Image (cartoon, rainbow, N blue to C red):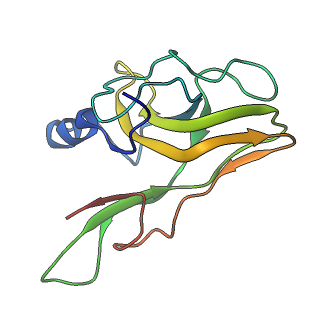
């Protein structure tokens, strides 16, 4: 399986069981090469095909801050819950990656979602993952 973008099954089950607290838990984003096999069934952080340490990258990735805690849209007839993270930056950076995995630190490091960058991205000075506008139409994680 190549990198497959989306919320993970672990995240969906974890939401229902109270495994995630977006007000107090710490989350990280790890970066992966094109050889990674991560997607909906990835249940925990993995080092397989993670970008190697060095060039400004540390295995395990960077802490990502929840920028919009779980909230709902304004349409009372079609409420969409959503949340988002602040942009993640590596500076300096000198590496190539193809995707990312957001996961909760601790408790078995359960996964939240997988990002596919659509191709290899090569950083030569800095690297930033920019999240879309955090609203009920565009946020990185939306639940209808």
The quadrant in which residue 51 appears is: top right
Of 133 and 122, the residue lying toward us: 122
Residue 39, given in percent of the width and then of the height, sits at: 36, 34
> What percent of the width, then of the height, locates residue 2?
42, 31
Q: Which residue is drawn at the image coordinates 53% and 23% (left, top)?
A: 35
Q: On screen, 71 above or below 129? A: below
Q: Is residue 115 left or right of residue 53?
A: left
Q: Residue at x 36, y 74 (%)?
A: 137
91 left or right, relative to 118: right
In the picture provided, is 5 more to the left or to the right than 9? right
Residue 124, position in %: x, y?
85, 40
Q: Quadrant of residue 42?
A: top left
Q: Which corner quadrant holds the C terminus?
A: bottom left
Residue occupying the point 31% across, 25% down:
43
Res. 26 in view? no
**Corner quadrant of residue 83:** bottom left
């Amino acid at each position: 399986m190549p990198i497959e973008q989306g919320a993970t099954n672990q995240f969906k089950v974890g939401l229902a069981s109270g495994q995630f607290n977006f007000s107090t838990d710490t989350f990280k984003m790890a970066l992966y090469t094109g050889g990674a096999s991560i997607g909906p069934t990835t249940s925990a952080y993995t080092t397989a095909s993670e970008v190697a340490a060095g060039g400004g990258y540390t295995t395990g990735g960077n802490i990502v801050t929840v920028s919009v805690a779980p909230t709902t849209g304004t349409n009372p007839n079609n409420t969409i819950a959503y949340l988002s993270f602040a942009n993640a930056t590596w500076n300096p950076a000198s590496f190539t990656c193809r995707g990312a995995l957001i996961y909760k630190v601790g408790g078995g490091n359960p996964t939240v979602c997988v990002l596919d960058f659509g191709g290899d991205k090569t950083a030569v000075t800095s690297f930033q993952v920019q999240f879309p506008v955090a609203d009920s139409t565009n946020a990185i994680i939306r639940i209808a």
